[in-house]
Amino acid sequence: MAEPAKNDAHIVEIPVSIDKATAAEAAEASGAHPLGEIAASAGHLLLLKLWQREEDRLGRRACALESRMDAARRDAFYLCTAFLAFHGLSLALLFTASVAAAAAAGSGGIGGPATSAACRRWWAPSSLSLAASLALAAAVQLRVCAYWRAASRLRRERGDARALARAVQELRMKGAAFDLSKEPQYGVTRAKCASVEGSGAWAPLRWCQQNVVTACLLAVAAAALPSGKFILCA
C-alpha cells in the first residue's frame, strides 16, 4: 500500500523587535563592552594609557602647587610675627631709653640736656624702624605674590584635570566608536575659569583682598613712625 501523503507544513514568520537596552545587554554579555573594545583596539588603548598618565602628572603638579601655597602661607605668617615682635621690642627699648633719659634729667632739672638730646635724635630709631618695617613688609609681599601665583596655577591645573577626566570618561563610554582625533578641551575650560575668576569681584577690590596683609603691615609701620618722637619727647 502507498504511504499517506504528508500534509504540507505552513511556516509563519513572527517579527521580533529588540529594544536598545536589550541589545546593549546582549552586546555586553557577548563581550562587546566599551572597555573590551578599547582593549582590542591598539590606538584606543594607547590613547587611554596616555591620558591616564597625563591625569597622574596633573595630580602630582596640583599636589606640588598646594605644598608651595602652604609654604608661602607659613613663611608669610612667620614674617608677620617677626614684624610685630620687632615693633614691640623697638617700642619697649624706646620707652626704656625715655625713662632713663628722664631719670638722668631729673637730677639736673626737668628739661635738662639729656632729655633734649634724646628728643633731638628721635629720627634715628624711627628711621631704623621704618627701614626694617619696609624690608619685612616687602618680604611678606613677595610670599603673598608667590601664594596667589600658585593659587592661579592650581586653578588652571584643576581645570585641565577636569577636562581630561571628561575626555577619559567619554572614551570609556564610547569604546571603539570614540574619535581618536578628539582632544580634551583645555582652552574652553581655562576660558571658563578665567571668566568666572574675572566676574567674581571688581578688579581693585580683588587686588585689595589679595594684598590686605601688606596693607596692614604698612599701616602699622606708618603708625609706629611718629611714636618714637612721642615717646622720647613726651
Image: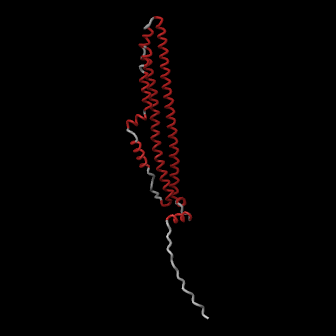
Q: Residue at image x 46%, y 42%?
A: 153
User: Based on the displayed image, in which of its 4 quarters is residue 39 positioned?
Assistant: bottom right
Q: Residue at image x 49%, y 59%?
A: 174
- Judged from this view, the residue extending furthest toward the bottom is 1
Q: Is 209 drawn above or below residue 155 in the view shown?
A: above
- Quarter containing the N terminus: bottom right
Image coordinates for residue 233, horizontal then vertical, percent:
42, 13
Q: Residue at image x 46%, y 5%?
A: 108
Q: Is 108 drawn above or below residue 78 in the view shown?
A: above
Report the coloring of the rendering.
Answer: secondary structure
Q: Is 147 drawn above or below residue 217 in the view shown?
A: below
- Judged from this view, the residue extending furthest toward the top is 108
Image coordinates for residue 152, horizontal then vertical, percent:
45, 41
Q: Nearer the viewer, residue 24 or 69?
A: 24
- Judged from this view, the residue extending furthest toward the right is 1
Image coordinates for residue 103, horizontal then vertical, percent:
49, 9
- Quarter containing the C terminus: top left
Q: How many marks?
A: 0
Q: Residue at image x 42%, y 35%?
A: 209
Image coordinates for residue 134, horizontal then vertical, percent:
43, 26
